[in-house]
């Protein structure tokens, strides 16, 4: 459990780094998405790429913004490994090891969906780096849309961990004060999944509400904190147990 705790801390710290690195000027973007990093993930033409690299207040692409997005993609490769490990090793595996058949099914789906999302995310980053450098036959949209779809599906099925609370992870006795955040975490993951999938569908079908996609993924914040506390308590109560 101690390794799980350190993994969750690393994930939280890197998520903060990714959030800070994504800060920058709003751009023309695509279908109302003004954040350059997110808008680039849905670029499907040279015009989309130029719009992402052009701040709202400018008339031509900004070289500083270009280097900013390139740096963000390299940081994302590390983030992919971390979020895959959190969902696969902690959430998915904990559900698979549970006694409940439903929990095992949910765990298997979490492991499959997050693996597909991670692979699509890697290809998306490669595509972004290529189009920024002038290659226009390998569009990020081809991988960005599947990545978000499977990531939000992963969030939805991960909610089962907080509702079913398998004993292999939630084995230490918790008071009612901690039980509420656990339940709320399940609700947040479900809400984030539904909001993200709805926003993604609206964006792809009608080019609207794409701005919902990014914030929906932030609803993993409380669940990660809850897991961090739980893993820390487990490591304190059974320090000799290996995970």
Image (tube, rainbow, N blue to C red):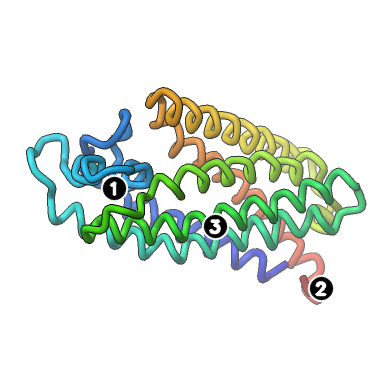
Who comes first in sequence, dot 1 or dot 2? Answer: 1
Question: What residue occupies the far left of the structure in this picture?
Answer: 59
* 176 or 139: nearer the viewer: 139
Residue at 39 percent across and 58 percent down: it is 125
212 relative to 78, above or below: above
- Find disc 2 in the rendering and name its residue: 241
196 relative to 13, above or below: above
* 187 or 156: nearer the viewer: 156
Q: CA distance from mark 3 to mark 1?
A: 23 Å
Residue 185 lies, in percent from the top left, at 66, 39
Residue 201 left/right relative to 75: right
* 163 or 97: nearer the viewer: 97
- In the rendered image, which quarter contains the C terminus? bottom right
Tell me the number on the disc at residue 120: none
Label 2 Cα crowd, 10 Å radius (few <14 / some 14-19 / many 20+): few
- Find disc 1 in the rendering and name its residue: 23
Quadrant in the picture for residue 82: bottom right
Residue at 20 percent across and 55 percent down: it is 66
134 relative to 211, above or below: below
Is label 3 or label 1 in front? 3
Label 3 Cα crowd, 10 Å radius (few <14 / some 14-19 / many 20+): many
Is label 3 or label 2 in front? 3
- Find disc 3 in the rendering and name its residue: 118
Residue at 32 percent across and 53 percent down: it is 137
Quadrant in the picture for residue 135: bottom left
Secondary structure beneath label 1: loop
Residue 56 lies, in percent from the top left, at 16, 35
Residue at 81 percent across and 69 percent down: it is 238
Secondary structure beneath label 2: loop
Label 1 Cα crowd, 10 Å radius (few <14 / some 14-19 / many 20+): few
- In the rendered image, which quarter contains the N terminus? bottom right
């Amino acid at each position: 459990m101690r390794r799980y705790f350190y993994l969750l801390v690393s994930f939280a710290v890197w998520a903060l780094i990714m959030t800070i690195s994504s800060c920058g000027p709003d751009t023309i973007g695509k279908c109302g998405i003004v954040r350059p990093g997110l808008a680039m993930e849905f670029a499907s033409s040279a015009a989309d790429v130029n719009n992402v690299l052009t701040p709202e207040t400018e008339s031509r692409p900004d070289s500083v913004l270009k280097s900013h997005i390139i740096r963000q993609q390299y940081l994302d490769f590390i983030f992919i490994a971390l979020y895959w490990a959190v969902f696969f090793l902690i959430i998915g595996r904990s559900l698979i090891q549970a006694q409940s058949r439903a929990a095992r099914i949910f765990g298997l789906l979490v492991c499959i969906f997050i693996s597909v999302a991670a692979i699509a995310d890697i290809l998306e980053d490669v595509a972004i780096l290529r189009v920024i450098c002038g290659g226009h036959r390998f569009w990020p949209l081809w991988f960005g849309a599947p990545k978000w779809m499977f990531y939000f599906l992963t969030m939805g099925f991960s909610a089962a961990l907080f509702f079913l609370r398998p004993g292999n992870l939630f084995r230490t006795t918790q008071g009612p004060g901690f039980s509420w955040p656990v339940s709320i975490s399940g609700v947040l993951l479900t809400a984030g999944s539904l909001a993200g999938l709805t926003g993604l569908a609206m964006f792809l079908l009608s080019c609207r509400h794409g701005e919902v996609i990014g914030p929906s993924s932030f609803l993993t914040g409380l669940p990660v904190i809850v897991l961090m506390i739980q893993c820390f308590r487990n490591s304190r109560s059974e320090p000799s147990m290996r995970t």
